[in-house]
Image: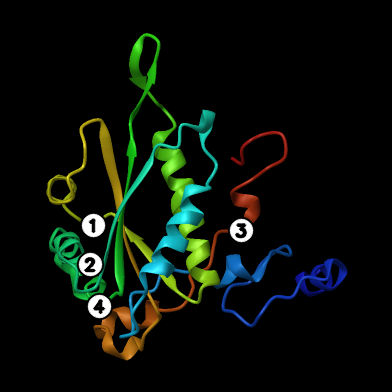
Amino acid sequence: MKIAEKVAEMNVTLPINPRDAEHPVDALFLNRHSPRAFGDATVSEAQMLTLLEAARWAPSANNFQPWRFAWGLRGDAGFAAMVDTMVPFNRAWAEKAAAVVAIASKTGVAKDEGVVPNPSHGFDAGAAWVSLALQAEMLGLSAHAMGGFDKAAAAAALGLPDGHEIHVLVAIGKKGDPAHLPEALRPREIPNPRQPLAELAARGQFPA
């Protein structure tokens, strides 16, 4: 059965998009991507709190909720501090975003025997990131997570407590004109495709 037939059968509407879903999914998942071209539009504190509220409700193993966030709007000292820790490639485009969020997680959990490692802290922080990114899409915003930054410098600048690990910085804002990017980056301002599902998942076992 072709994807168009599956969509019609399940009454799911998919917009025109360079991505081609093999099975019916909400358009939110196809439309979300990580742009580098951001416009001049600002993001309000209320919008940021909505994004963080969505992240707060992410799934968490044993409800430990290890995720932690530091954020700043363009013009804030915290925004500038985070941008300053980025590698030059990321700084060149991310400094034009309306906001930046640092996502970290608490690596241990307090139990009767003391603080013990929480092996799922990074996984849970990733779930919080996805919740934030999808909420951004629903607000007409875009979020781009990046690992290209000096983690030690960011931890120091943001006062990351001991026993925590910083994972990513996230640039947030309204999509802008790709023409303002370096020429080499302009073709990458469309949603990327994905590997075929059969290469990623198999019934009863992992794919070879």
| Gap between marks 3 and 1 measured at Cα | 28 Å
Residue identified by numbered label 1: 148
* Quarter of the picture holding the N terminus: bottom right
For the point 37% across and 65% down, the residue is 144
Q: Mark 4 vs mark 1: give the one in front.
A: 4
Whether the residues at callouts 4 and 1 have beta carbons within 8 Å, the answer is: no
Mark 3 burial class by Cα count in 10 Å: few <14, some 14-19, many 20+: few
The three-letter code of the residue at mark 4 reads Lys
Provide the residue designation for mark 2: 90
Q: Marks 3 and 2, Cα distance to the nearest angstrom?
A: 29 Å
The answer to whether residue 43 is left or right of residue 162 is: right
Compared across the picture, whether 88 is left or right of 106 comes to left
Q: Can residue 154 be seen by looking at this rendering? A: yes
* Residue 130 visible (yes or no): no
- Marks 4 and 1, the one that precedes in the sequence: 4
Q: CA distance from mark 4 to mark 2?
A: 10 Å
In the rendered image, residue 38, in percent from the top left (x then y), is placed at 33, 80
